[in-house]
Image: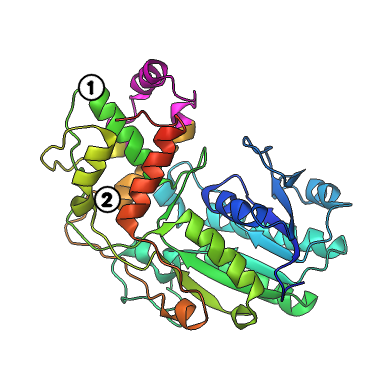
Amino acid sequence: MEENGEGSVLIVGATGVVGRAALEVYESDDHWDVAILSRKAPGFPTRAAWIGADLGDPDGLATALEGAGPFTHVVYAALQEEAILVDGWTSSAQIGRNALMLHNLLESMRLGGHRFQHLTLLQGTKAYGVHHGPYKMPAKESDPRFMASNFYYEQEDIARSAAQKQGFHMTILRPQIVCGFALGNPMNAVTALGVYGAICRELDQPFRFPGGPACLQEAVDARLLGRAIKWAGREPLCRGETYNIANGDCFSWPVLWPGFAKQLGVEIGIAHPFSLADVMADKQPVWDRIVAKHELVPYSYVDIVSSWQFMDYLLRHGKAYPHHSIVSTIKARTHGFHECVDTEDMFRSLFDELQSSKILPAP
C-alpha cells in the first residue's frame, strides 16, 4: 500500500488550516480512503468519514474509534491554544493539554487494535525557540532543542516512544506561517489581513502597516504543506525524520503591503505601529455591516479571525529590532520534496479565492 500510494488515512484535526489542506490532497486521490476525527462535524463538503470525538476524553475517544478503519496512515494536525494565544505558548496547562491529546489518541488506537504504518506529526518554528527571540538561522532540523518547555517536545517524545513499542514509522514536519483558510483558527494570517483591509475600507481609513521593524520571514501555502504531508507518509526516506517545510523564498511584510492594499481595494497609508489586538477588539459591528453590505457568507467576527494577537506577533508589533525567522528546507529537497511556491503569488491566489467564495469582499 505505502509504495504505490494507496491506503487509508485518518486525519486528526481536519477542520483546521493544516488538516483541511491535507484532507483536500488525500480526497483528490481516489486510491485513498479518508477519515477525519474532530469534535465538530466539518462545515464543508467532504467524502471523508467523520469520527466525532474529543481528544481530551479517552473513554469517548476509544468508543468513537470502535469499528473505524483500518488505517495505514495517521496525520496529527490537532491543536488547542490558550485564549491569550502567544502567552499560552509557554503555559504549562497548554503544554500538558496538547501532550495529553496525542497520548489519548495513540493509546486509544493501541487498545482498540488499530495497527497503522505511519504517523505524521506537525510542529513549527517554535521548536527552535522563535517565540523567545532571535535564534540561529537558518534553523536546521539537527539543531538542539531550545531549553524552554514546549508541547512539541512532549508530543515528539510520546510519539517516538509509541512508535518504538507499536511498530509504526513517524515523520515530523515543521512549517512556518501556514496560509490557508479554516474557521476558528487562531493562526490564520491571510483571513486576518483580509478582514483588517475590509474594515479599513469600510471606515474610510488607510491600510496602515501596524508592525515593528522590517524583517525576513518565511511562509508556507497550506496546499503545498498538504502535499508534503502526503509525501512524508509515502517516502521511505522520511521514516523517523524531521523536515522544515516552507514555500522556498522569504518575504518582508512592508514589501508585500502595497500589493495587499491593491488586492483588497483599500488605499495604503503611512506605517503606524499599533496593536491589532487592541484596535480590532471592538470592530465586530463593522464586520457585520460589511457582511450584510457585500452579501458575504455570514461567518461571525470571532470565527473568521479568532486571534488578532497572532497578527501582532507575526508583524512584530512592539519589537525594537528586526526579528527574522528563517529555516533551511534543504533536507526535504535532498530527500525528494522539491515543490515551491512564490509567497507573493500565494497571497494573491488566496485572497482571490476568499473573495470569489464571498468570504472577503471583492475590491
Q: Residues within 10 Å of mark 2 (few under 14, many from 20)?
A: many
Q: Earlier in the sequence, mark 1 or mark 2?
A: 1
**Is the stretch drawn in magenta largely helix, strand or loop?**
helix
Q: Nearer the viewer, residue 88 or 341?
A: 341
Residue shown at 36% from the left, 28% from the top: 361
Q: Quadrant of residue 157?
A: bottom right
Taking the spot 87% from the left edge, 52% from the top edge, the residue there is 66
Please give the residue where the numbered disc 1 appears in the rendered image.
Answer: 203
| Residue 128 image offset from top left, x and y in percent | 41, 71
For numbered disc 2, what is the local secondary structure?
A: loop
Q: Which numbered tag is attached to residue 315? A: 2
Give the residue type that dot 2 points to: Leu
The residue nearer to you, when weighing 51 against 132, is 51
* x then y, percent, for residue 304: 46, 34
- At 52% across and 38% down in the image, what residue appears? 183
Residue 169 found in image quarter:
bottom right
Vertical comparison of 361 with 22: above or below: above
- Describe residue 231's horizontal placement relative to residue 5 as left or right: left
> Image quadrant for the N terminus?
bottom right
- The stretch drawn in magenta includes residue 280: yes
Checking the image for residue 24, the label placed there is: none
> Residue 139 at what x, y percent from top left?
37, 75
